[in-house]
Image (cartoon, rainbow, N blue to C red):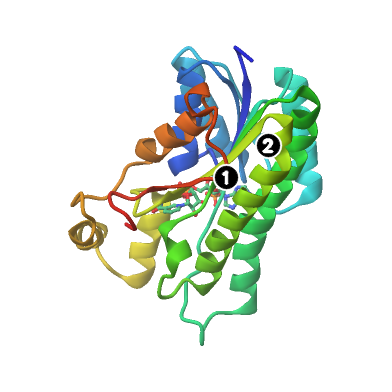
Amino acid sequence: MAERVAIVTGAGRGIGAATARILAARGDRVAVWDLDIGPAEETAAEIRAAGGEAIALACDVSRRDAVEAAVAQTVQALGGLGVLVACAGLTRDNLIHKMSEEDFDIVVATHLKGSFLVAQAAQRHMVPQRYGKIVLTSSTSALGNRGQANYAAVKAGIQGLTRTLAIELGPFGINVNAVAPGFIETRMTRQTAERVGVDFEQMKAQAAAEIPLRRVGQPEEVGRVAAFLCSDDASFVSGQVIYVAGGPRG
Ligand code: NAP
């Protein structure tokens, strides 16, 4: 698997885009998936401009038909599938007494069901070839976070999914791990600041004061850990959740 094909979901922005760029720079041919084709095209164009190979696909990871079609298109266009990094995500924060059922459901569908669907579709290609690297995205919120009952539940669920897939797929030469980022500077955290009416720089400073490394993280700092988990340097690492949070729990 000297030259691999990698799918990165949610790769039009933030952590997914950084991961896609890093995998491509290290030699993978990358399928850049996102909900809308526009941001996916932007990341793919950046990769190609840097000398890498990438295609862009629109795919809502919460829909089985869309996921299966996008996997088939990826395999057809790039000639295989060796790596999956699931980064697609959104937040719908609220305190439990105000959280709507719709906001609970969309977070479950995007993160938990989405990770399940993409991993299930990917392993169909990985098992027969006895090779695969899967990285799912959890969060420090898995440990509990005020206003994020939906998000904390799915991010904890992704840790259970990671360990279980590692047990089931290990016999077929497939490593399954998760990254669990803390506060990373992306549109997601910017949107949180906007929603609660706090200046983003002020929110970053407040978060940094609580983080042992005294700063917030950048998308590339998560992407490099995801790329390591997909590499042969991590060939005997499976079923692990690596916190990328500037400290033991962000
Ligand atoms: P981001 O910049 O908002 O990027 C997330 C991407 O996922 C967006 O392009 C978004 O598309 C896409 N997406 C949303 N719903 C989707 C769906 N149903 N199907 C396909 N794509 C979908 O966020 P990020 O901060 O990079 O987050 C990436 C991952 O890291 C998420 O799983 C997030 O929970 C996790 N994480 C982030 C942080 C942080 O501090 N930023 C911390 C811990 C964990 P649209 O733009 O069209 O909505």
- Taking 55 as reference, is 47 left or right? left
Which residue is painted at 66% across and 34% down in the image?
A: 57
Identity, as a three-letter code, of the amino acid under mark 2: Gly
Find out if the beta carbon at label 1 lies less than 8 Å from the nearest ligand 1 atom: no
Vertical order, 148 against 91 (above or below): below
The x, y position of residue 130, in whole percent, is 74, 25
Labels 1 and 2: the sequence-earlier one: 2
The residue indicated by pointer 2 is 170
Quadrant of the frame with the N terminus: top right
Question: Can residue 13 be seen at all in this image of the molecule?
Answer: no
Q: Are marks 1 and 2 in contact (CB under 8 Å)?
A: yes
Quadrant of the frame with the C terminus: bottom left
Question: Can residue 39 be seen at all in this image of the molecule?
Answer: yes
The residue indicated by pointer 1 is 239
Which residue is painted at 64% across and 73% down in the image?
A: 102
Alpha-carbon neighbours of circle 2 within 10 Å: few (<14), some, or many (≥20)? Answer: some
- Compute the Cα span from label 1 to label 2: 9 Å
- Taking 221 as reference, is 33 left or right? right
Alpha-carbon neighbours of circle 1 within 10 Å: few (<14), some, or many (≥20)? Answer: many
